[in-house]
Structure formats: C-alpha cells, structure tokens
Amino acid sequence: MASVDIAINGRPYSLACDDGQEQRILGLARLVDERARRVVSQVGPVSDTLLLLMVSLLMADEVGEAKGIAERAAAELDGFDAALSRGVDVLSGRLAAIAERLEKA
C-alpha cells in the first residue's frame, strides 16, 4: 500500500492508497485544493470541516450537472439510433424492391 502527501488549502494530509494510484490521488487533490482556495477567496477563512463540506457540495453539484448532461446526450443518441434504424429499414426495403425488379427484368 502506497502513501501520498497532499495539501488542501495549505493544510497537509497523508493518505494511504493502492500502489500505482499516487498520481491519480495527487491530481484529484489538486482539483479539491483549487476549489477550496476559490471558496476561501469568496467567503473568507472558515474551519477545515466547513470548507471541505462546501467544496464537497460544489463538486457534488458539478457531478450532478455532468450526469444530467450525459443522460440527455444518451437520450438523444437513443433517438438518433431509432431514426437510423428506421432509415436502414426503409433503405433495405428499397433495395429489396430494386432487386425484385431486376430479377423480373
């Protein structure tokens, strides 16, 4: 098991993680730190607990928005797939009709 040292809003934390996940944890910590610093710049100093709660809520909101976008995109793709399927059926019917006329000619 590996260990990673991170800092959120200037406070050091040491985390255990699976071997090979160190860079991922560092990247995630940078994202959290950026948002924490943004919150502090907007609301001023707050306790670490309140700061991490606020950052968690902001990031949860972002995840919710991203999920909504993904769900809308999936629904649009489903509609596209259905239209494409209908189009293929129409073309298939036309090709069958052409083949039948060619056989009779």
Image (spheres, rainbow, N blue to C red):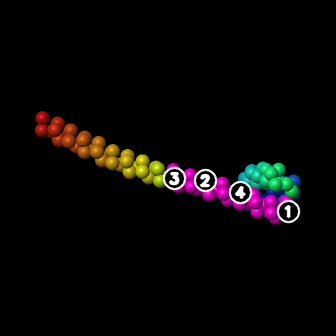
Mark 4–mark 2 Cα distance, whole angstroms, equals 12 Å
Amino acid type, label 4? Leu
Q: Secondary structure at mark 3?
A: helix
* Distance Cα–Cα, label 3 vs label 2: 10 Å
Q: Which residue is mark 3?
A: 72
Q: Which mark is residue 58?
A: 4
Q: Which mark is residue 47?
A: 1
| Residue 23 in sight from this viewpoint | no
The numbered mark at residue 66 is 2
- State left or right for residue 86 relative to residue 56: left
Taking the spot 71% from the left edge, 60% from the top edge, the residue there is: 57
- Magenta-tinted stretch: 46-73
Q: Secondary structure at mark 1?
A: loop
- In primary-sequence order, the first of circles 1 and 2 is 1
Looking at the image, which residue is at 61% across and 54% down? 65
Sequence order check, earlier mark of 4 and 1 = 1
> Could you give the CA–CA distance between mark 3 and mark 4, rounded to whole angstroms?
21 Å
Amino acid type assigned to the residue bearing label 2 in the image: Ala
